Image (spheres, coloured by chain):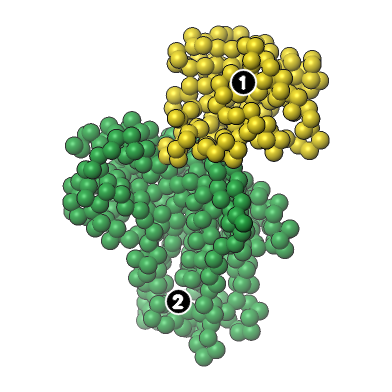
Amino acid sequence: MRHEVRFSGYGGQGIILSAVILGRAAALYDGKYAVQTQVYGPEARGGASMGQVVIDDAPILYPAVTDPGIYIIMSQQGFEKYGVAAREDAIMVLDTDLVRSRPVCRYHEIPATAEAKENLGREIVANIVMMGALVAITGVVSREAIERAVLDSVPKGTESLNTRALKRGFELGERA
Amino acid sequence: MSRLEFMQGNAACAEGALAAGCRFFGGYPITPSTEIAETMARRLPKVGGVFISMEDELASIAAVIGAAWTGTRAMTATSGPGFSLMMENIGYAAMTETPCVIVNIQRGGPSTGQPTRAAQGDMLQCRFGSHGDYSTIALTPNSVQEMFDLTVKAFNLADRFRVPTFLMSDEAVGHMRERVTIPDSVDIVPPAPLLEDSLPYEAGEDGIPGFAPFGSGRSVHVTGLTHDERGYPDTTDPEAHDRLVRRLVAKVESARHDIADYEVINPDAERVFVTYGPPSRTVAQVMRDHPDESVGHLRYRVVWPFDESALQEFPDAKVFLMPELNMGQMAREVQRHVDQPVVPISKIGGELHTPAELLQALEAHR
């Protein structure tokens, strides 16, 4: 089955990296096919950022995302630009404190940035907390696959911090 | 043991170049090709190669041509505005029969246009962009795996035919990430050497002279002026010019069925999509979702030299439908080879054709 996943937030949160990690988990560790793409312009840190992933059991022909079923939204501007048109049967995981609006589709509030800052000590892992929550809520990839993909992708010396962030995300997702 | 990676198209292109033995990159960064230069800058010094960040694209292609004459596999990567700047020396590479690879990760043009968006707007420029008559080879990948595979192939073709060879990709494939298999080694076919009793620009039946790079022991004069078989300028003799330029064109064009690389789906079809690059994936999606024996697909992986005989693989074709990310560039080429109507399905602005758009085009030609 084809899953289309869209990540949005602001530049600097690791939005595109999140999409790459999810694609990597599916393509290298879950034995599925994945295509990761992004839409970007000349904006740098602070502007709306968006990354997308298609995951399928069959080879992926058309590579672009047209109608995502899963959204991860980490900023109000990201919601307005890339999340507001979510179809009614989509699932949205949003950062409680960074997104004011709420969609018409099913959604889960995850206080990822607050959790990263206050309990994990580094705001920069908020995207990994979101990723854990996403996997716990949707099961779009396995927990083993996402853990391996996260460890492949983060700088040396931050493995334990990122693993804790991911596991905290699993817990928040289970409760959401 | 090959290895699996989840990698960006541009990175796979660089990996393909390294696997093919490319040891020189001269370039000037430009979106959306920059990751190729970044990867080569990081990797080349570790394998004994040279990366030079040049002052502009004129110098980039000049440096690549110089490096190629030392017998080193050499490349550059750019996008529209840089590609335009390279045109004069691309003609020089064609005239001097310098094997080199030029990657164009196409973006929306003209001018600086849409730096971060996909296009296929330079398909005629890569064939006709420099002045005078000449011929080139151009390959068009549609996946990250093909960014690797066709880059390797581009180096082998460049060496075999002693011709500047283009990897004509685009922002969509260059920036997409997919799983890719990187083999331990790839087939490398070096250029035929210049035989001792041959003149430097004396060619046999295939029209391709043996290659004697600098340092190989032969003295070779290299000039962009019309030259004789010795390599010496001969700029006023009509016959010398006719002989040289007709050979430069013929050595590639007469081998077009041999260089050809294309896929044929449903050869009995009446309505036939003709594609290259990413629109081929939208067509494949439509054909998987709506199986129909009357719909066929011809996908070119080598666009130049254009192999018109591939079109004859569809004897029952009533119409050729050509989705391109430009205003119908290759459709013009197809039109001159067939009697049936050729319908350009042109899309510009940076997004791929959607399956719905192509389905609609199919319905309109039922």
Label 2 to label 1, Cα distance in Å? 61 Å
Q: In the rendering, at what x and y percent does residue B37 appear? A: 63, 50
**Foreground residue among A150 and B23:** A150
Query: Residue at left 60%, top 84%?
Result: B218
Quadrant occupied by the N terminus of chain B: bottom right
SS for dot 2: loop
Which chain is yellow in the rendering?
Answer: A
- Name the residue type under label 1: Ala
What crowding class fits label 2: few (fewer than 14 Cα within 10 Å), some (14-19), or many (20 or more)?
Answer: many
Q: Check disc 2 and report the residue beneath it.
A: B208
Colour used to depict chain B in the structure image: green
Chain under callout 1: A
| Horizontal arrangement in the rendering, residue A107 relative to residue A155 (left or right) | left
Q: In the rendering, at what x and y percent does residue B135 appear? A: 41, 65
Residue B309 is tagged as none
Q: In the rendering, at what x and y percent does residue B59 appear? A: 62, 59
Quadrant occupied by the C terminus of chain B: top left
Residue B319 visible in rendering: no
Q: Check disc 1 and report the residue beneath it.
A: A136
- Name the residue type under label 2: Ile
Q: Nearer the viewer, mark 2 or mark 1?
A: 1
SS for dot 1: helix
